[in-house]
Image (spheres, coloured by chain):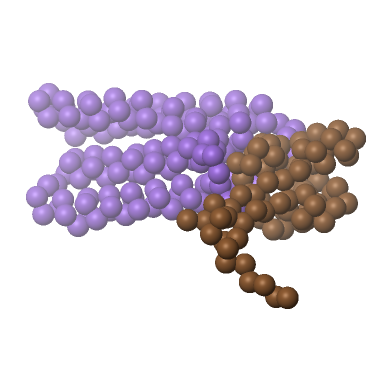
Amino acid sequence: MPTESMSNDVKLQRFLAQDMTQAELGKRVGLTRQTIAAIEQGRYSPSLDVAFRIAHVFGKRVDEVFHWQPGVNEGNDAVSLG
Amino acid sequence: MSSLEKRALLALWSMCPVYCVYFVIQIGLPYLQPTMLERIGCLAVVASIHATAYVIGLLAIKRREAGEPLLEDERDRAIDGRATRTAYFVMLTGLIVVGMVMPFNNSGWKLVNSALLFIVLAETVRYALILIGYRSPRLAH
């Protein structure tokens, strides 16, 4: 059973962006304050579209804000391209 | 608490107690030998109480939400969609029972009340799943 996990630095990025509020970030990306809170707490994985928009607000790439760790099984299945 | 969550909570609180009382009365009614008018009156009173409680609650919610820029987003729609899909199957089961099975053995108010019961059940399942959806540990888009 894969045990992948998503994490993000949205809270950190908000802090670095002059302590931007959840409501302000939500307004800029078209989400409610509650959904921003859920994303920060890892209770909701946003759509790709929203992830790009959040990263864009902070002037970062998506992979700098959102991180995905493959599960134990999936990590072993990785194909070497070298 | 998000807008959809508040509305789901309001719908549950305004609907469940009122219809619980209604169905308890309906179980006892045959012993009281009510007339058709009394039965319709009972249903009308219950529906009016439900509607009044819901509208008052909705107005209170709308008043508190005035000025909020966004009331619903993709997470709300995902939670609502998931809850509605499950409630649809409850309604489908009700339709099969009330519309295809019960008419062979029952008629009149038994059919009416059974249909109403399945509507209330489907709505309860939908709103309960919405509330659970907001509290579940993880929901992917």
At x 71% / y 31%, what residue is drawn?
B66
Answer with the quarter of the image where residue B92 lies. bottom left
At x 84% / y 35%, what residue is drawn?
A15
User: On screen, B111 above or below B64?
Assistant: below
At x 73% / y 35%, what residue is drawn?
B68
* Percent x, y of residue A52: 77, 56
In the displayed structure, does residue B97 sit left or right of residue A43? Answer: left
* Percent x, y of residue B139: 56, 47
Answer with the quarter of the image where residue B17 lies. top left
Q: Quadrant of the C terminus of chain A?
A: bottom right
User: On screen, B112 above or below B92?
Assistant: above
The colour one sees for chain A in the rendered image is brown
Q: Residue furthest bottom?
A: A82
Which one is nearer the viewer's eye here, A73 or B53? Answer: A73
> Can you tell which chain is drawn purple?
B
* Percent x, y of residue B122: 36, 44
